[in-house]
Amino acid sequence: MKTIEEKFNEAVRRGQKVYKSKSPEIQGYLKAVKEKVAIENKDIKPYITNPAYYVCDTCGAKGIDHPGTSYCFICNTDNFTRIND
């Protein structure tokens, strides 16, 4: 049986819109991830790309990158999708 972390990571790898999941387990895990990342990033200023062009399919943040890794500043995943113009 898969753990919630494994299910979450699988969804991220598949590029699913995790923040739209109806699973309370996934939503709870996403909330915990966001809280952990907020603590880790508390003294860092995010790099803001044009929010009209990119969205994080994990947490739904638009155009907020970590300046050192380019991962999502909110959830620390690399699950961005370009928004169609």
Image: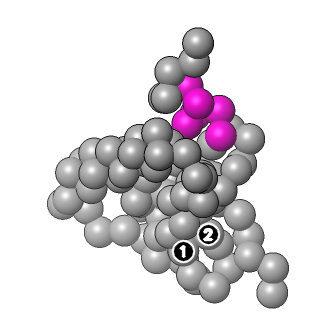
Which amino acid, mark 1?
Lys
- Asked whether 43 or 10 is in front, the reply is 10
What is the secondary structure assignment of the residue under circle 2? strand
* Location of mark 2 (residue): 55
- Residue 48 in the image: x percent, y percent? 46, 76
Question: The N terminus appears in which quarter of the rendering?
Answer: top right
Q: Residues within 10 Å of mark 2 (few under 14, many from 20)?
A: many
Q: Which residue is mark 1?
A: 62
Q: Is residue 83 left or right of residue 33?
A: right
Image position of 72 with respect to 1: above or below: below
Q: Is 31 placed left or right of 36 in the picture? A: right
Q: Is residue 9 magenta?
A: yes
From the viewer's perspective, tell me whether residue 5 is left or right of residue 14: left
Q: Amino acid at mark 2?
A: Val
The mark found on residue 54 in the picture is: none
In front here: 41 or 15?
15
Quadrant where the C terminus is found in the figure: bottom right
Is residue 16 something that shows in the picture? yes
Residue 7, given in percent of the width and then of the height, sits at: 59, 30
Q: What x and y, as percent, mark residue 26?
A: 50, 42
